[in-house]
């Protein structure tokens, strides 16, 4: 059976990606990261989703003492979505960007993939309804695939590990509709950057989630009674 | 003053690289990694070297639970240098390769560089007297620089962070002679993969170190009475 490492944050995108990878008959190994994110709640979601999907997972602790992000530094306010959208429009990366986060996550996934013999690393990045993070764009993933080709033992041995980004061009509503068809447990996912008891409804991540469910004509189970 | 992040293992190459960066008037921030390597002793060396060079440092703990390397898995024997050299000759990566290690180290260095405003990341990789690790080659670093260009906020803002590899084409003896001229405290460095009280003298890393000192016509202070 083909093997894959799946980066699982506990949000909608990574969960739909996990279910897509399973649908494509990959034996999936999920990586979950605790990087002292403000919305630590997503870690519990990711664990529950892994178990629900009957996949192995590993929780890794990542130390980023220099912070440099509103998701790490409690002194920086999480921006409201309309600010974030203006920034995106002007090609300004918002304060919720975590420096080199996807590069770090992918490098651990790559290390794991080399050892467990996985041929693919799945990540749920997309560029339609997103916050304009540079490490979510197609060009970045192309460049990372080149790093794998040039810098790994697996490549020297003539084998191939590829970062796959099946959602890259999809809108949030398309992702949600796709997930619905795959039986994704949306009730277990978490998106809000603030990580409170209920979604805040005003951060970037809440905004895209709400918009996605509305456009898909579906109800978000986190907001239902 | 220009800033740099320096990957410091505590061995000769990274220490000479640190001194080179200082010579080039960089304000250096050293990153030291505890990845449960067998030769943990090098961590103490790296700390001492940072202090000796009057540089700030940060020790980061990296979790690689899948291991996949003789440097991590105590059940795999550290190969003797003549085996390792045969492997290199046949383009076989030795068992001391740590999957994706330099990619992981560089990704943390990049995250740090974005936050502290460093324009360079120094790494002491070279390809003359080395073990044939693919993540030490020029092509790999070129590919990683492309990742920085495509995937960071710093690049979106029109600034540049570059991985610099000033030793890439140098032999070990050239590196040692260069270090001598820069006042490198070789007595504080550590190279042996086994990490015992004394260098084992037969691993790959000891072999290249001994050969380097011999060819440079110098005595290794670790082997002097």
Image (tube, coloured by chain):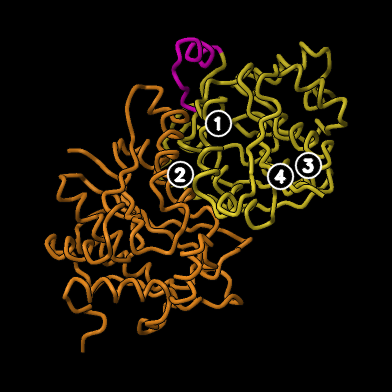
Chain colours: A orange, B yellow
In the rendered structure, does residue B12 fall within the stretch colored magenta? Answer: no
Give percent across and percent down for residue A121: 33, 44
Q: Tell me the mark number nearer the camera, choosing from 2 and 1.
A: 1
- Residue at which label 3 appears: B49
For residue A128, side relative to residue A134 (left or right): left
Chain bearing mark 4: B
Chain bearing mark 2: A
SS category of the residue bearing label 3: helix
Residue B176, relative to residue A11: is it above or below? above
Residue at the (73%, 29%) spot, across then down: B12
Is the residue at mark 2 from the same chain as the one at mark 3?
no
Q: Which residues are magenta?
A: B82-96
- Residue at which label 4 appears: B44
Assess whether mark 1 and mark 4 are in contact (beta carbons under 8 angstroms): no
The mark nearer the N terminus, 4 or 1, is 4
Give percent across and percent down for residue B84: 52, 16
Chain bearing mark 1: B
Chain bearing mark 3: B
Mark 4 closeness class: few <14, some 14–19, many ≥20 residues within 10 Å = some
- Residue at which label 1 appears: B142
Closer-to-camera residue (B117/B38): B117
Q: Tell me the mark number nearer the camera, choosing from 2 and 4.
A: 2
Mark 1 closeness class: few <14, some 14–19, many ≥20 residues within 10 Å = some
């Amino acid at each position: 059976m083909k093997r894959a490492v799946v980066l699982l944050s506990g949000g909608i995108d990574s969960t739909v990606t996990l279910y897509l990878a399973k649908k494509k008959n990959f034996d999936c190994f999920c990586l979950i990261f605790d990087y002292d994110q403000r919305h630590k709640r997503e870690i519990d979601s990711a664990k529950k989703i892994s178990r629900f999907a009957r996949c192995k997972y590993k929780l890794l602790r990542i130390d980023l003492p220099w912070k440099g992000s509103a998701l790490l530094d409690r002194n920086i306010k999480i921006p409201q979505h309309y600010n974030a959208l203006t920034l995106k429009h002007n090609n300004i990366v918002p304060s919720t960007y975590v420096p080199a986060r996807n590069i770090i996550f992918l490098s651990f996934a790559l290390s794991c993939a080399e050892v467990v013999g996985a041929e693919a690393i799945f990540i749920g990045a997309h560029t339609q309804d997103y916050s304009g993070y540079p490490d979510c764009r197609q060009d970045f993933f192309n460049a990372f695939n080149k790093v794998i080709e040039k810098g790994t033992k697996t490549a020297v041995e003539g084998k191939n590990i590829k970062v796959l980004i099946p959602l890259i061009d999809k809108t949030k509503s398309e992702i949600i509709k796709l997930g619905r068809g795959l039986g994704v447990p949306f009730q277990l996912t978490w998106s809000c950057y603030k990580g409170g008891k209920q979604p805040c409804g005003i951060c970037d991540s809440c905004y895209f989630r709400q918009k996605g469910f509305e456009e898909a004509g579906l109800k978000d189970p986190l907001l239902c009674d």
